[in-house]
Image: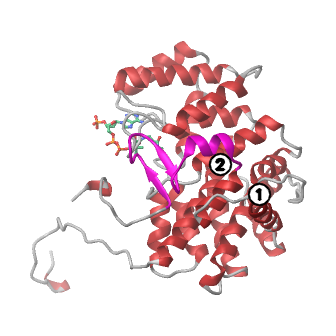
Amino acid sequence: MSKGLRGIEAGTTSICTVGETGDDLHYRGYDVVDLSEHCIFEEVCYLLLHGNLPNKDQLKSFSNNLISKRSLPDPLKIVLEIIPKETNPMDVLRTACSFLGNIEPEKSFDNQMHCSERLLGIFPSVLNYWYHFSHSGNKISEENDSETIAGHFLHTLHGRKPTETEEKVMNISLILYAEHEFNASTFAARVCAATLSDFYSCVTGAIGTLRGPLHGGANEKAMELISRFEDEESAAQSIYSMLENKELIMGFGHAVYKKQDPRNDIIKKWSKKLSVGRTNEKLYDISSRIERIMKEEKGLFANADFFHASAYNFMDIPTKLFTPIFVCSRVSGWAAHIIEQRSDNKLIRPGAKYVGSDPLDFVPINERD
Ligand code: COA
């Protein structure tokens, strides 16, 4: 028995390897370092969904398809407009996904590629429509001339075209978060897919799973942590005492990687670049100091979430939207896994080691103490 199924191979996949030859990450055989350096997110989505990198024509047609799937149907807008401002935006995405399954049901598995593209296209629109309506009463348009999901997300959030650097960093971020083998939310999606349920149910379950602070929620918790401190010194003192009290420091450690998370160096570099000239530039130095302390004191490394916190903050993204951005990205991986699970399906139904009582004689209710 392995607690948390650690180290157990719970199925086969040809989508992704995590830590196969060290602390590395590959999507369909390509190193995430190369993909994040050379690709836009759409290329990586195509790779995950179709198994190969697109040529120029394929990318153009795939991107156009995604653009055509950004629009919000009126009944969904009505639902989004009644969800209160205080709601966790992950719950908003979960509800929106589930509701789409009502109004645009997946009638047959032949539509699975359409569903994948629909969710990739629509999630940024959903998130920012709800965010603006609930916080300021504005009904934003989901139409803009951004050709990428990264640009569309930032445009609908800020109401302006993003800078080239912002769009690049958002592309990198979406690529880094896109896929991670049998992580908890993907596994949840596969368990649901294995019952031959519909696409929207699989993704709804995955969103609920990603919501937890031990999984996707860590980037928001990391932001709460680093924004507490005035400077590096107060951060250091606080981290030492948190460690003494055996508190978890969010954004550190990993269930699979042992020495480093290969995504950390990439997003850390961009966080540094984005920090230059910002009034809250110190967030980067505070984060770096915490990273050093965690290494020295616990031998723990920053995972992908830690420097995402400052990078997103430098792009003026509200903290409550950090984990939902993860959804906008990881839906590519979930979709690829749902399709893969369906292609060679077997109901997922593990056994459990029983640790309860031995068989007992039944006691009628009148004879119980
Ligand atoms: N802060 C402080 N201590 C940590 C830690 C952290 N972020 N992550 C792990 N540790 C400690 C544990 O307390 C444990 O110490 P112990 O042996 O004295 O009990 C040891 O390191 C091993 O941790 P464990 O929980 O067994 O590792 P895991 O592989 O099961 O867990 C995580 C991996 C990601 C769940 C865990 O590192 C964590 O909770 N991190 C914070 C949340 C986070 O950043 N999640 C995003 C993951 S991408």
User: Is the CB atom of the residue marked by disc 2 within 8 angstroms of ligand 1's nearest atom?
Assistant: no
> SS class of the residue under badge 2?
helix
Which residue lies at the image location 62% right of the left edge and 56% below the top edge? 327
For label 1, the residue is 56
In the image, which residues are magenta?
A: 15-40
Q: Residue 228: which quarter of the image?
A: top right
Foreground residue among 292 and 113: 113
* Residue 151, above or below 337: above
Give the SS element for disc 1.
Answer: helix
Judging depth in this view, the residue of 287 and 115 nearest the camera is 115
Residue, disc 2:
174
Please tell me which residue is depicted at 43% across the width and 31% down the height of the picture.
301
Residue 21 left/right relative to 85: left
- Could you tell me residue 270's position as x and y percent? 66, 31
| Residue neighbourhood size for the residue with mark 2, other residues' Cα within 10 Å, grouped as few (<14), some (14–19), many (≥20) | many
Asked if residue 16 lies left or right of residue 104, the reply is left
Amino acid beneath label 2: Leu
In-front residue for pair 301/282: 301
